[in-house]
Structure formats: structure tokens, C-alpha cells
């Protein structure tokens, strides 16, 4: 779709920090123009989810959600916004899909439970039968121009897919093949990541550049630890021992050293705060295995690639692997030089005296 | 002849709900509330570090995560034998209160209002049920404008929350023993700045809009009566102390059954499963010992939601229950009309204003430089209960810790109470009861039915849980 905004400028805008330039009023007119010229329709479905991703996108600031749904995208179905209910909306959803074959984008929120033929998540009734979520993802997904997985659950399986995975939840990429997929993980994703991805699709009718896990690089090419406000504490080896204390959060369980996203500079909820700034630990909620690790235990080992893990103490040996995922060498360097001590003993870890 | 109407999915709620009603002579004569999604999150908690509960269990629901983070943290506080310092208690209340404000605004305007006003003629506001939209065009326009403004307002309520919680949905700050964020004057100012704007919106636009709906739809004072029993665990502690039930709270713990108010007895709760897709021998258990063995081949069963009862009685929970048992005058003066669709909407709006007002006082009680969190040690084995009030009603989390790991986790959530199916005595759940007698003008557009359903503010992701202490696999079943 022709537009006056070059893709390079678009990515520069999206990758910038929220307060300054990203997704600002500057971007909105271009999106509106593209949408007026017939931007693709969007169908949004929810499965094994908590609705958090939908609530998060409501928090978008520039453009605000009113503009997004009235001017930017043609949102043909969303379970929380749809005025209708029952058969009315299910039939409409399928009609939109068949009339816009390979033209519409499907947003999927939530993991896909496949145990017992998908009976653990039924999203409606169609032709007198239960419509399972797995069936809807297959039928709608295969007709879509592309699938946008919003949230870690649809992207990677997320919380419901965590062992023992009681309902055999799968990520969408295991359900639909041969359709372009973007993963916008996060628990939930930042509204800018979702709106930015939608905007890219509307402006260029093409998926943005992706990393090895299918995430748009414009949002997920940074490591939390590299840009953390508490970074200076780490460099000075000052570690918080209790919640509410100043210091690097590593000893309390922070997963910032292997988490990819730009929350450190983008900030959340209109620039008010973000996880570690609030004294919390990073959960690495944008990573494929989230939340398989203990949240408040000190990082014992790092997943550095599919099927490969390394303990912090050995990490110098896998620098190459880390570099592939963009983890800065300084972390490993610091570990190697002994700045981060060896893993604490059991008592010290669990007591917080 | 009776006609059966199936509404699947019920939209503009959280989660996956289907409702089947039987209509005879233009009125609902039978109703079934069906929970259609199940994730088994409590099973995932088993064997994990117990402290993960506050963070992970909040992911039960993205609309009211704070309820679960709070109940989860309270259960851990209880198991660890600790309590937050005053700053920790107050900041937890501010985080929770901010979410009340966003959740109530979101519910009335974005989930419920489109049953009474016509939205813009563009998707996703079309297609819609045809029905008796009673506002004249100019008033309709005005409410749609407020709908759009409310989108901004609820966003600001989430910003207010993030000042203390880090981010929203799914805050980072609530931990066993208190919170992680520390108070300072800038945060207090930023918080108050937004709170002021929200308080004005609630008092000058939200409450008046509810009253305008009530004027145009006065018959809904008599529709959606329900079971007329109320359960309130109590919430927003105003003082220190380990006994949740007896300590002073903004919402006191109370029970209202058969017209009588009494004190809360937590041991009076059990869960029935006769009409649920779970094995019969798992019914009648207390929350601490409840076991779930799914079986959807079970004859007569129709929901994943269990049927909790208080001394055998179905209980309504939520804003109406809270306002009624604490004696909020506008609500109690309504008499029997309080037990209605409009009673629920009005109670929710009044409560929203009440919580906002209280937060303005609480935030000034914070003391910079004082601790926000009590250090903890994970006991080898322990048991904990966390009771609180979510925006949708009474919420309880129960945990058991063995070998410093979670052995059992269980949550009984507001929507489990409100949307429960029939119990072992064949008594319908509160929402099912509320549907009986609802007039339905056009079975193809059952707008009256969804008005009743949405007055309860259902949250299905919350309502459906499962736990198995012995890690058994879920049995196979067919639906059809």
C-alpha cells in the first residue's frame, strides 16, 4: 500500500521511546490515510486467555484506543467489544473471513488447548455444534493474510502451557502452518507493540522484520538488563536483599539479563512506571518458556537458545550463543570476573533477613 | 410452547460463557449458565515456589488481576505468619482501589452500556441485537460520547495503579509481606492528580449515566432479582492485625441470608458438583480439601463452573452485596428493588465513588522512608487462606505448602458464586435464578436476557479452576 512514510522512518518511530516520538500523533495521520484507502479488516479471537492483552491494548495512548477502533482498523470482531452476541457474531466473523480471504488479519489472544479435541475451550456455537477454539484458529487462520499472536500464550503457549500443561495448550504456530505469523509476546504485551505491529501491517500490508522467535525486532531487540535504571547498582555490585530496597534485583530473582523488550525506555501506562523501576523483578514474560522458571529465585541458568541452557557460572563458555540473541557480553564478563557471586546457599536464598 | 434460546458466546464479558434459556409465554422459565473454558492453572502451581502464587495467579484474569494478586499474597502472608507494614497495607489498597475504579468504569460503559444505547454504526458495534433502545437520539449521542470518554478515564485509572504497581495489567509490586514500590511525594502527587479527575468523572458522569438508564428503563428495577442472599468476605483493611474477618475494613465481612444479617463463618462454605463436568465423589468438599476430577461425559452436567454454597444456600457476591450489607443508604432504601439489574449497576457506581474517595484519604497516610515489605522465610510446611473482595465480589485463595513447595492451590472466585450451576439440591445459581421471569419480546434478539447476565459482570476466566493434589491426569471426554 503506498504511503508517504518510509518503512525506515516507521521503524525509527516505533523503536523510539514512547514519550518522545513513537506511535505519536505524527504516526496516526499516515495510518488513517492508509486505512481510508482500504486497510485490511481485523478479526480478534480469544482462547485460553485472561483477556489481559485486550485490556492492555485499551491502554494505548498515541493513538488512543478510540482512534484505533474508529479510524485506524476495521475491527470486525472482538469478544469484549462486539455489540452483538451468540450466533449473530459467530456467523458475522466467518462471513468476514470468507469475504476477505487472504486479505484480513487474525489476532489471536490466548493459548490453544488441544486435549480432548479442543473441548477445554469453546468459543461459541456454529451450526448447532460447539465451536472449539482450536477449530476456529484453524479455520480462520488458514484463510488469513497473516496471524498476529498478541501475548505470550498465543505466541509460545504461556502460562496455561506450563508443565504439566493440563489441557495440552499449544502456541498458534503449532496449529496453523503456511500462514505468515508475528509473535508479539508479553504478559501482557505493551500496547505500543500491538498497535505498532497492526500499524505496520496496515501501512505496508506486510509483516515487520522478525527475530528468531518471530518477534518484531523493532520492539524486541533490546535486553532489559542492558538499559535498566538499576543497572548502575549492578555495575557497582549493590544488590537488593529485600523488596523495597535500592539495588540491582538480581538476587531477588530478576530475569532482566535474558529478557528481550524495550520496557526500560518505553515505560508502561502512559510513561508512569515499569516492572523493575517499581522494585519488582523482571519475569522475562516476553520469552518463549515463560513462566517455567521460579519468579523469586536467583537466576540459576540461562536459556541461550532452543534446547541449550547454561548456568550463570559457566556462562563465559557460551558467549557465542548469547551474542546470537543479543545479550551483551558485559553480563557474562561480570560473571566471569566474579562480580556476581556464585549462587547463594539455600538458607540465605530463602530467608530475607 | 416453550422455546429454547442458546446464547453462545455471551460477548462483552470476560471469558467464555454460554447461556441457555427456555422461554414460555414471553418469559424465561428455565435457565442454564455454562462455563466453557478451563485452563487448570492451579495444577501448574503444584510443586512451584509458593511465592510465585501472587504473580502467577493474578494471571487468572487480565481484567481483575489485582484481586488474585491480593488474595494470593494474603494467603502467603497467612501461611508465612507475617503481615505487611502500614505502608505495604496502604499501597496494596491503592493498587487494588485503582483497579476497582478502572474495572467498574469498564464494566458499565464498555461491557454493559451497549445493551441500552446504540453504538456507532461501524464494527465492532455492529451487528447488534435489535431491541428496545429507548433513549432519544440526542441522549443516545451523549451516552456514546461518555462511552468514548470513559475509555480515556479507565486508562488513567490504570496509570494511577501503575504508579504503585509498575505496570497494568499484571502488576509487579504485590509480594508476600507487602509491596515492592516505595512512597515518595512525586508519586503521591501524580496519583492524586489523576484521582481528582476520576472522582469528578465518576460523580458527574458515571453515576448520572446510570441514573439516566434507570429512568429510561424503570422496569429493570423489577427484573433480575436473583437469590436475595449476599456473601461478603470483606476487603480493604484499614488497620494492622492478623485476623482478616474481625479487623476494620472499608468493606466489612458480613452475610445476608433469608433476610437476616450475620457474621461470616468461613467453614460454612462447600462446593457442589452434581451439574458440573467433574466426578460426583469430589462434591461437598471444603475449599481446603476440594479435589477436581473432570468428567464431561457426565449425564446432566452442563458447566465447568462449580457450585459453591454457604450453609447450602446460593449466594450473590459483588458490589450490590457489599453496599447492601454495609447499609449504604441509597441502596438499602430501595427495598426489594435493590435486588435487580439496576440495583447492581447503581451499587457498582456508588461503590466506585466510595473507593475513589477513600483512596484520597489513604494516600496521604503513606510515610516516606518507612518500610513497605516485611521480610519472610518460607516455612517447611504451612497452610494459608487469603480472603478479599474483588470488583466482582468475594474471592478466596487457599494454599498448602509442603517441603517449601506448593502442594495444593485452590481459588473460589466471585463468578463461581454468581454464575454457578444447580447444586446437589437442584437449587439454581444466583444468575440462573435472576433470569427466571425475565420478559423476552423477540427470541431472535434476546436483549433482555443479556441485560440480566451482564448486570453480574461475569468473569469466566476467573470462574473455572481445577486442582488435583495427586497429580492425576484429566480424564478424557467428548462434547456433542
Image (spheres, coloured by chain):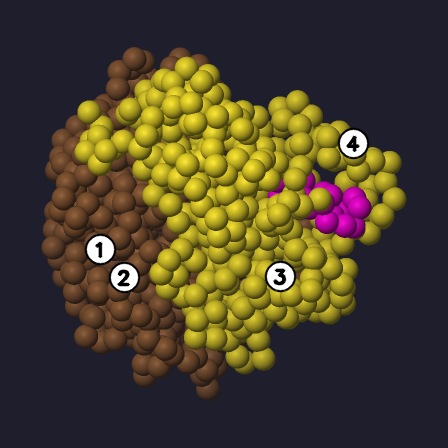
Chain colours: A yellow, B brown
Q: Is residue B192 magenta?
A: no
Vertical relation: B75 (above or below) B369: below
Horizontal relation, residue B138 to residue B292: left or right: right
Label 1 chain ID? B
Compare residues B409 and B364 and report the one nearer the observer: B409
**Part of the protein shown in magenta:** A193-208
Q: Secondary structure at mark 3?
A: loop
Horizontal relation, residue A339 to residue A134: left or right: left
Q: Secondary structure at mark 1?
A: strand
Q: Main secondary structure of the magenta part?
A: helix
Residue under numbered circle 4:
A9
Q: Are marks 4 and 3 in contact (CB under 8 Å)?
A: no
Q: Which residue is located at x 43 percent, y 58 percent?
A: A161
Q: Are marks 1 and 2 in contact (CB under 8 Å)?
A: yes
Residue under numbered circle 1:
B408
How far across and how far down the image is residue B82, in percent? Answer: 16, 33
Vertical relation: B368 (above or below) B171: above
Q: Are marks 1 and 4 in contact (CB under 8 Å)?
A: no
Badge 1 density bin: few <14, some 14–19, many ≥20, Cα 10 Å: many
Amino acid at each position: 500500500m503506498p504511503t508517504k512514510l518510509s518503512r525506515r522512518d516507521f521503524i525509527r518511530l516505533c523503536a523510539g521511546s514512547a514519550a518522545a516520538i513513537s506511535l505519536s500523533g505524527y504516526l496516526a495521520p499516515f495510518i488513517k490515510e492508509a486505512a481510508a484507502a482500504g486497510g485490511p479488516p481485523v478479526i480478534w479471537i480469544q482462547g485460553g486467555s485472561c483477556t489481559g492483552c485486550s485490556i492492555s491494548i485499551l491502554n494505548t495512548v498515541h493513538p488512543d484506543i478510540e482512534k484505533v477502533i474508529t479510524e485506524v482498523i476495521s475491527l470486525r470482531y472482538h469478544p469484549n467489544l462486539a455489540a452483538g452476541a451468540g450466533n449473530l457474531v459467530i456467523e458475522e466473523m466467518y462471513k468476514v473471513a470468507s469475504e476477505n480471504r487472504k486479505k484480513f488479519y487474525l489476532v489471536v489472544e490466548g493459548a490453544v488447548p488441544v486435549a480432548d479435541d479442543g473441548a477445554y475451550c469453546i468459543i461459541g456455537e456454529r451450526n448447532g455444534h460447539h465451536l472449539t477454539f482450536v477449530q476456529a484458529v484453524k479455520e480462520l487462520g488458514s484463510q488469513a493474510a497473516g496471524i498476529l499472536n498478541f501475548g505470550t500464550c498465543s505466541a509460545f503457549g504461556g502460562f496455561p502451557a506450563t508443565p504439566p500443561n493440563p489441557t495440552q495448550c499449544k502456541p498458534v504456530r503449532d496449529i496453523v502452518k503456511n500462514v505468515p505469523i508475528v509473535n508479539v509476546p508479553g504478559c501482557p504485551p505493551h500496547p505500543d507493540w500491538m498497535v505498532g505491529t497492526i500499524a505496520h501491517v496496515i501501512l505496508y500490508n506486510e509483516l515487520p522484520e522478525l527475530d528468531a522467535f518471530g518477534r518484531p525486532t523493532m520492539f524486541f531487540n533490546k535486553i532489559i538488563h542492558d538499559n535498566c535504571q538499576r543497572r548502575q547498582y549492578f555495575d557497582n555490585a549493590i544488590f537488593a536483599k529485600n523488596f523495597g530496597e535500592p539495588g540491582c534485583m538480581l538476587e531477588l530473582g530478576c530475569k532482566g539479563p535474558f529478557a528481550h523488550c524495550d520496557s526500560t525506555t518505553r515505560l508502561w501506562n502512559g510513561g508512569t512506571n515499569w516492572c523493575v523501576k517499581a522494585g519488582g523483578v523482571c519475569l522475562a514474560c516476553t520469552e518463549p518458556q515463560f513462566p517455567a522458571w521460579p519468579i523469586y529465585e536467583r537466576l540459576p541458568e540461562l536459556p541461550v537458545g532452543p534446547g541449550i541452557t547454561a548456568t550463570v557460572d559457566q556462562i563465559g563458555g557460551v558467549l557465542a550463543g548469547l551474542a546470537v540473541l543479543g545479550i551483551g557480553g558485559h553480563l557474562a564478563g561480570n560473571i566471569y570476573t566474579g562480580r556476581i557471586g556464585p549462587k547463594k546457599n539455600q538458607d540465605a536464598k530463602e530467608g530475607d533477613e | 410452547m416453550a422455546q429454547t434460546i442458546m446464547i453462545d458466546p455471551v460477548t462483552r464479558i470476560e471469558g467464555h460463557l454460554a447461556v441457555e434459556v427456555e422461554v414460555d409465554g414471553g418469559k424465561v422459565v428455565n435457565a442454564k449458565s455454562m462455563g466453557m473454558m478451563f485452563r487448570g492453572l492451579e495444577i501448574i502451581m503444584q510443586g512451584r515456589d509458593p511465592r510465585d502464587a501472587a504473580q502467577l495467579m493474578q494471571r487468572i484474569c487480565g481484567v481483575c488481576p489485582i484481586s488474585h494478586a491480593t488474595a494470593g499474597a494474603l494467603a502467603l502472608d497467612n501461611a508465612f505468619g507475617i503481615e505487611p507494614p502500614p505502608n505495604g497495607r496502604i499501597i496494596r489498597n491503592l493498587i487494588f482501589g485503582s483497579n476497582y475504579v478502572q474495572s467498574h468504569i469498564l464494566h458499565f460503559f464498555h461491557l454493559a452500556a451497549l445493551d441500552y444505547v446504540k453504538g456507532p454504526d461501524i464494527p465492532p458495534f455492529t451487528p447488534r441485537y435489535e431491541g428496545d433502545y429507548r433513549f432519544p437520539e440526542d441522549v443516545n449521542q451523549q451516552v456514546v460520547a461518555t462511552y468514548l470518554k470513559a475509555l480515556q478515564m479507565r486508562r488513567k485509572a490504570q496509570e494511577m495503579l501503575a504508579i504503585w504497581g509498575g505496570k497494568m495489567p499484571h502488576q509487579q509490586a504485590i509480594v508476600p509481606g507487602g509491596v515492592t514500590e516505595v512512597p515518595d511525594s512525586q508519586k503521591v502527587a501524580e496519583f492524586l492528580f489523576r484521582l481528582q479527575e476520576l472522582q469528578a468523572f465518576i460523580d458527574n458522569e458515571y453515576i448520572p449515566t446510570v441514573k439516566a438508564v434507570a429512568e429510561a428503563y424503570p422496569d429493570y428495577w423489577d427484573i433480575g432479582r436473583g437469590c436475595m442472599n449476599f456473601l461478603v468476605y470483606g476487603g480493604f483493611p484499614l488497620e494492622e492485625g492478623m485476623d482478616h474477618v474481625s479487623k476494620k475494613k472499608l468493606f466489612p465481612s458480613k452475610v445476608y441470608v433469608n433476610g437476616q444479617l450475620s457474621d461470616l463463618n468461613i467453614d460454612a462454605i462447600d462446593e457442589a458438583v452434581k451439574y458440573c463436568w467433574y466426578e460426583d465423589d469430589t462434591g461437598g468438599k471444603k475449599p481446603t480439601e476440594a479435589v477436581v476430577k473432570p468428567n464431561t461425559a457426565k449425564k446432566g452436567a452442563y458447566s465447568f463452573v462449580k457450585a459453591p454454597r454457604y450453609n447450602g444456600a446460593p449466594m450473590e457476591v459483588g458490589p450490590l452485596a457489599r453496599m447492601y450489607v454495609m447499609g449504604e443508604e441509597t441502596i438499602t432504601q430501595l427495598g426489594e428493588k435493590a435486588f435487580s439489574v439496576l440495583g447492581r449497576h447503581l451499587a457498582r457506581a456508588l461503590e466506585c465513588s466510595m473507593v475513589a474517595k477513600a483512596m484520597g484519604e489513604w494516600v496521604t497516610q503513606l510515610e516516606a522512608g518507612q518500610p513497605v515489605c516485611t521480610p519472610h522465610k518460607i516455612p517447611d510446611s504451612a497452610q494459608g487462606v487469603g480472603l478479599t473482595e474483588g470488583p466482582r465480589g468475594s474471592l478466596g485463595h487457599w494454599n498448602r505448602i509442603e517441603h517449601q513447595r506448593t502442594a495444593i492451590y485452590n481459588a473460589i472466585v466471585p463468578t463461581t458464586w454468581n454464575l454457578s450451576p444447580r447444586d446437589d439440591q437442584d437449587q439454581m445459581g444466583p444468575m440462573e435464578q435472576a433470569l427466571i421471569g425475565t420478559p423476552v419480546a423477540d427470541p431472535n434478539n434476546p436483549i433482555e436476557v443479556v441485560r440480566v447476565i451482564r448486570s453480574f459482570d461475569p468473569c469466566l476466566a476467573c470462574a473455572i479452576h481445577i486442582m488435583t493434589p495427586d497429580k492425576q491426569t484429566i480424564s478424557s471426554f467428548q462434547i456433542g
